[in-house]
């Protein structure tokens, strides 16, 4: 299923109430179409290696969770045209800092680079979290980002670097 463009050229934003305002979750969309749309975005944002590893590691206990995040988070939310992937990454980074999800933060910092955020923009997001999420949380977030960037520099790329420490989401 393709994700049609519904932006008005003069504003560059989706038309409110337009037919594609809900991403792949359209009236009449099948569960498989929502899953497939979510998987497409999940692979684009997190990278095929990470997603393939998460799927390879699923078992009867985690299979429903993997299906849920692909359909609901990636198919239901990340395919929506209302805000950019850069904005979604900024919001996600902030949520990870606010809740202290450091391994997920590392994964989403990599995803933010994939989505087009610069290291300076990520730094600004983390500075903002210091005010609204607390300095101790931002301190850990800066250390996490520093480690991610070091890993990226070591591999010579700003593409998401996948390593064994990245959790299977």
Image (tube, rainbow, N blue to C red):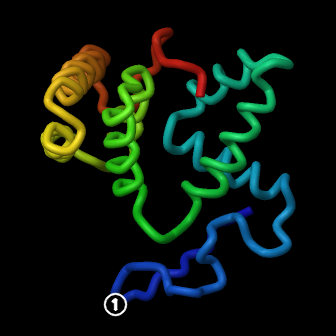
Q: Residue at x 68, y 44 (%)?
A: 39
Please state the horizontal and vertical placement of residue 133, each as a whole percent of the image.
24, 38
Q: Is residue 59 left or right of residue 136?
A: right
* Count of labels in the image: 1
Q: In the displayed image of the protein, which residue is found farthest to the top? A: 164
Quadrant in the picture for the C terminus = top right
Mark 1, secondary structure of its residue: loop
Find disc 1 in the rendering and name its residue: 10
Quadrant in the picture for the N terminus = bottom right
Please state the horizontal and vertical placement of residue 131, each as a whole percent of the image.
14, 43
Q: Residue at x 32, y 42 (%)?
A: 94
Q: Is residue 77 above or below residue 80?
A: above
Q: Is residue 141 above or below residue 115?
A: above
Task: Tell which of 131 and 81 is nearer to you.
Answer: 131
Q: Residue at x 75, y 22 (%)?
A: 62
Q: Is residue 25 above or below residue 32?
A: below
Q: Is residue 107 left or right of residue 118?
A: right
Please state the horizontal and vertical placement of residue 68, each as a whole percent of the image.
73, 40
Q: Is residue 24 left or right of residue 130?
A: right
Q: Residue at x 63, y 71 (%)?
A: 22
Circle 1 crowding by C-alpha within 10 Å: few under 14, some 14–19, many from 20: few
Q: Please tell me in which quadrant of the rendered image residue 114 appears.
A: top left
């Amino acid at each position: 299923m393709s994700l049609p463009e519904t932006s008005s050229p003069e504003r560059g934003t989706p038309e409110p109430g337009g037919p594609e305002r809900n991403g792949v979750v359209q009236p009449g969309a099948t569960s498989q179409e929502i899953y497939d749309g979510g998987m497409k975005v999940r692979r684009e944002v997190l990278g095929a290696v990470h997603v393939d590893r998460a799927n390879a590691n699923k078992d009867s206990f985690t299979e429903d969770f993997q299906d849920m995040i692909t359909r609901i988070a990636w198919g239901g939310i990340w395919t929506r045209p209302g805000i950019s992937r850069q904005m979604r990454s900024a919001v996600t980074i902030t949520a990870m800092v606010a809740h202290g999800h450091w391994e997920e933060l590392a994964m989403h910092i990599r995803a933010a680079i994939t989505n087009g955020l610069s290291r300076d923009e990520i730094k600004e997001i983390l500075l903002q979290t210091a005010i609204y999420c607390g300095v101790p949380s931002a301190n850990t977030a800066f250390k996490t980002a520093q480690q991610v960037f070091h890993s990226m520099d070591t591999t010579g790329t700003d593409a998401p670097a996948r390593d064994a420490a990245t959790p299977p989401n």
